[in-house]
Image (spheres, coloured by chain):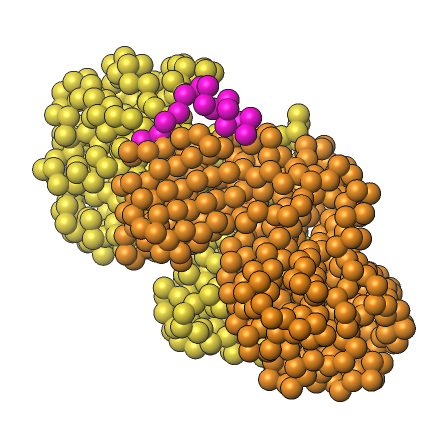
Chain colours: A yellow, B orange
Amino acid sequence: MASTHLVFSSRDEHRAWLAQQAALPAGFRVGTTRFEFVPREAPKPAKMTITLIALHQPTRDFAAVFTKNALPGAPVIIGRRRLAEPKLGAIVVNNKISNVCAPNGVETAERICSAAASSLGLQPHEILPSSTGVIGWSLPAEAIVAALPAAAASLTASSILPAAEGIVTTDLYPKIRRAQVGAGSIVGIAKGAGMIEPNLATMLVYILTDLAVPRDTLRAMLGRAIDQSFNTISIDSDTSTSDTVAVLSSSLVPCSDHAAFEAALTQVCRDLSEDVVRNGEGVRHVIRVQVTRAPSRETARALGKAIVNAPLFKCAVAGNDANVGRLVQAIGKYAGALSTPLDLSKLRLRMGGLDIYGDGVFRLDPTKELALAAHLKNAELYASAAPKDGVFTPPISHPAHERCVEIEVDLGTGSGECTVIGGDLTHEYVSENADYRS
Amino acid sequence: MASTHLVFSSRDEHRAWLAQQAALPAGFRVGTTRFEFVPREAPKPAKMTITLIALHQPTRDFAAVFTKNALPGAPVIIGRRRLAEPKLGAIVVNNKISNVCAPNGVETAERICSAAASSLGLQPHEILPSSTGVIGWSLPAEAIVAALPAAAASLTASSILPAAEGIVTTDLYPKIRRAQVGAGSIVGIAKGAGMIEPNLATMLVYILTDLAVPRDTLRAMLGRAIDQSFNTISIDSDTSTSDTVAVLSSSLVPCSDHAAFEAALTQVCRDLSEDVVRNGEGVRHVIRVQVTRAPSRETARALGKAIVNAPLFKCAVAGNDANVGRLVQAIGKYAGALSTPLDLSKLRLRMGGLDIYGDGVFRLDPTKELALAAHLKNAELYASAAPKDGVFTPPISHPAHERCVEIEVDLGTGSGECTVIGGDLTHEYVSENADYRS
């Protein structure tokens, strides 16, 4: 899961790179607007951004995958219905409130679709709604409807960056990835920094392309690409109620090489999924676990997830503490909880390229401990700063490098393999999620 | 899972109560000794306590249950063998290093058993070894063997308190619970504050009784008691490699009422398991989830575990933030990941006695939000203090009260129920596990 480019020395350098990535494929426009309101459930003002992603012409060729959370948000409920519609013309996204299990949430979302359709000259069922933010609050329908004309008036065909910025909540910086396929391109944006362990889908991700790929082919490709990307990451093991990945094709550029398109789509998904982890809430180390020679890919993925989700190991990584005992604990916990035993007799572990476990025993000494600590330190995205007013804030506005804590798990019993990406568990994560309401 | 007594205003008051609980049943002695050593894998001195729990006469009537972690420690491997031995005469426990996957770990543990047997006039196979602490390091066998005579010389029949203190690692205070059954008694001690989500067993727990209950009956009772106690708690979802619960009977007091004995044993297990959570690493709120009208007890327990293990909800509780959206997210995540769907159409939720969700929608308003925040504040065990030298330390040396964050989950679809107890996710937890090696 190599990223194409991910080393920046400053926010400005990152912004300049994002601007290059941001050119919209032919046939799309984006626009945003921002306003202040008071949520019904909490008497404190809040700010919301409305983002519109619109096609010049509604398209038959679109695909979307949604969360497997059993209590999905109203936009997900509607989005599943939209998959059966003949055409899609636009996406309307709000941040701040996610419209999950809110009284009359579906009706509110449909009302917003109708208003967006009016502003864009479309039918309501040609609009895909998306919401992200606090779960439990109700959308300010009046304010959103009132804001939509301004969002529509701001539509431009130049850059996706306003949309990448418009959809974020706790993200520290926008995330854009692109791929070129012949004369056409694929451009994707993602938001998501917490409540991230996608289950067949993830967060909010929008991928636009001008390459013409028929709906059924596109949907099959998206399913496979997600399996190779978003479904192999976890920030905090929590599966959001609003996860959505949508691909829209304007079909303006003929696509003769479907294999090249799928490879490019998969790469964009992989790049965005690593972006999401690297910008995960409080993440100070990205942890990459390569599980090989497992009985199956599913086992490899589940074991990798068990490692990147083990709180004690995550805390040790946060502290640059090579507590490999907790790594072994996580593996044994996963294997011990299975109804069918997993053979660990051939288990071999490497961390930072160093052998740390094999033949049933640890291979540790003080020199290796120092080398492992140096590997952890080298993968740190930023040094933790003292809290201000009791709150730890990541002092970061761009991805500083692409180094990971590298863990290799060789089960020696099969041919299944999977690389899973996750993050550590830090004071910054606790501050983000305990010290104030996100 | 009501506790018998759990409200203390000071460490001294708690100590006085512990001293009352600590009287040993007839037929037992405990002794400890403490020494300094340098671990082979880390060139920094460390301290270790050796604890001996000895019977006056080896007993046939003992029971033990061990971790389901698939990479168990050497003492667990030996302990499983000991279950087939005709008699057990003593337990030898060390803290600081857990002897898991260490080179020659089993041989080292057997050597310690032999030395302990020599000091106590027993056979090596009559000794149950236990170790807890860092995973990955090797036991200092020479130093332990050299220390055993001092531990044996300190054996006294008065109080179990030295053992309750001797076995701890990151625990903030010792944990002792007792029950009286006719002329006999049951006294249990526990250590454990992190890496706690028992899977059919947990942590280190030793329960002593003078009541005569035959081995097979005792083992069946212990299995049922654990199902009602340790298997319903989770501090951080991590299953230790060393979990052990052992019950030893000196059989000196006839026991005519087995039902009363089992009820008392179960109560001691429940009390100790709640003690373990209330003293969990960084735990500032104990969260009690009562799941009712579930399709089965197993589903009720798994759903309760999913809630107390959801990082985002745990962080919100830590911040006294009644973010009930994250509670719903955790329930939906659990239900959505099942292969067989779980019916959530009749789901009703209460928190702190207040209705917060029913008929598919939230029931929230600003007044209720304030009441929920007050409920969280009231369940706080201590106020988080600013970090010293970057490390958050719980300012607590005794359990301050027995209040919990009370969550009721009514699935409305069956008769299965289970109460699960867990804790929040705090800066103190991260400090404990990231800011220095435990």
Q: Which x, y percent locates residue A345?
A: 52, 78
Please indicate, yes or no, whether residue A158 appears anywhere in the rendered image.
no
**Where A345 falls versus A55 (above or below)?**
below
Q: Residue at the location (41% across, 69% down)? A: A339
Q: Residue at the location (75% across, 87% down)? A: B123
Q: Across the whole image, how many numbered discs are drawn on residues? A: 0
- Location of residue A51 (image quadrant): top left
Q: Which region of the structure is painted magenta?
A: B361-375
**Where A153 falls versus B338 (above or below)?**
above
Residue A209 lies within the magenta run: no
Q: Which x, y percent locates residue A76?
A: 26, 37
Q: Is A408 on the left or on the right of A127, as rendered?
A: right
Query: Which quadrant is home to the C terminus of chain B?
Result: bottom right
Q: Which x, y percent locates residue B371?
A: 50, 24
**A229 or B129: which is nearer to us?**
B129
Q: Residue at the location (85% across, 81% down)? A: B119
**Where B339 falls versus B105 (above or below)?**
above
Q: Looking at this rendering, what residue extends furthest in the left direction?
A: A86
Please indicate, yes or no, whether residue B339 appears anywhere in the rendered image.
yes
**B342 or A394: which is nearer to us?**
B342
**A254 or B397: which is nearer to us?**
B397
Magenta residues: mostly which secondary structure? helix
Residue B373 lies within the magenta run: yes
Q: Residue at the location (54% across, 53% down)? A: B233
Q: Which x, y percent locates residue B47?
A: 83, 61
